[in-house]
Image (cartoon, helix red, strand yellow):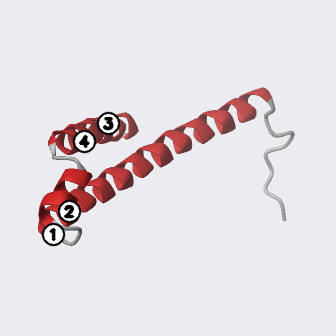
Amino acid sequence: MADEMEQQLREKIASQKASIANLPTLTSIVDETGLSSPETKARAQLIKELSGNEEKLELLIESKRVAAVVRLQDKLHPPQNSEDCP
């Protein structure tokens, strides 16, 4: 599940980066249409979505890393007794 989600995020990020790379530069958009043009806002929205997906991917990778460390810790240092604390 997590691997599938990670792969989907990676593909989505690659697609978004390609879309942004194919757009005119922000400087050329601003020079032609102005800072508050719909084109500028659309590019900013794409960048915002991309950064959100990159953040999700980073969190997913980090949670997998932490889970692996916890499993290794439990394997190397099992609990001394399995009774629940009162």
Kind of residue sitting beneath label 2: Thr
Q: CA distance from mark 1 to mark 3?
A: 30 Å
What SS does tag 1 mark? loop
Query: To which residue does mark 1 refer?
Result: 37
Q: Are marks 2 and 1 in contact (CB under 8 Å)?
A: yes
Density class for disc 4 (Cα within 10 Å; few <14, some 14-19, many ≥20) is: some
Q: Are marks 1 and 4 in contact (CB under 8 Å)?
A: no
Q: Are marks 1 and 3 in contact (CB under 8 Å)?
A: no
Q: CA distance from mark 1 to mark 4?
A: 26 Å
Query: To which residue does mark 2 refer?
Result: 40
Q: Is residue 51 left or right of residue 69?
A: left
Q: Quadrant of the N terminus?
A: top left
Q: CA distance from mark 2 to mark 1?
A: 5 Å
Query: To which residue does mark 3 refer?
Result: 10
Relative to the observer, which residue lies in front, 27 or 58?
27
Relative to the observer, which residue lies in front, 14 or 38?
38
What SS does tag 2 mark? helix
Density class for disc 1 (Cα within 10 Å; few <14, some 14-19, many ≥20) is: few
Q: CA distance from mark 3 to mark 2?
A: 25 Å
Which quadrant of the figure has residue 12? top left
Density class for disc 2 (Cα within 10 Å; few <14, some 14-19, many ≥20) is: some
Residue depicted at x 80% and y 51% = 83
Relative to the observer, which residue lies in front, 52 or 86?
52
What SS does tag 4 mark? helix
Residue depicted at x 13% and y 59% = 32
Q: Is residue 47 left or right of residue 73?
A: left
Relative to the observer, which residue lies in front, 19 or 30?
30
Q: CA distance from mark 4 to mark 2?
A: 22 Å
Kind of residue sitting beneath label 3: Arg
Which quadrant of the figure has residue 66? top right
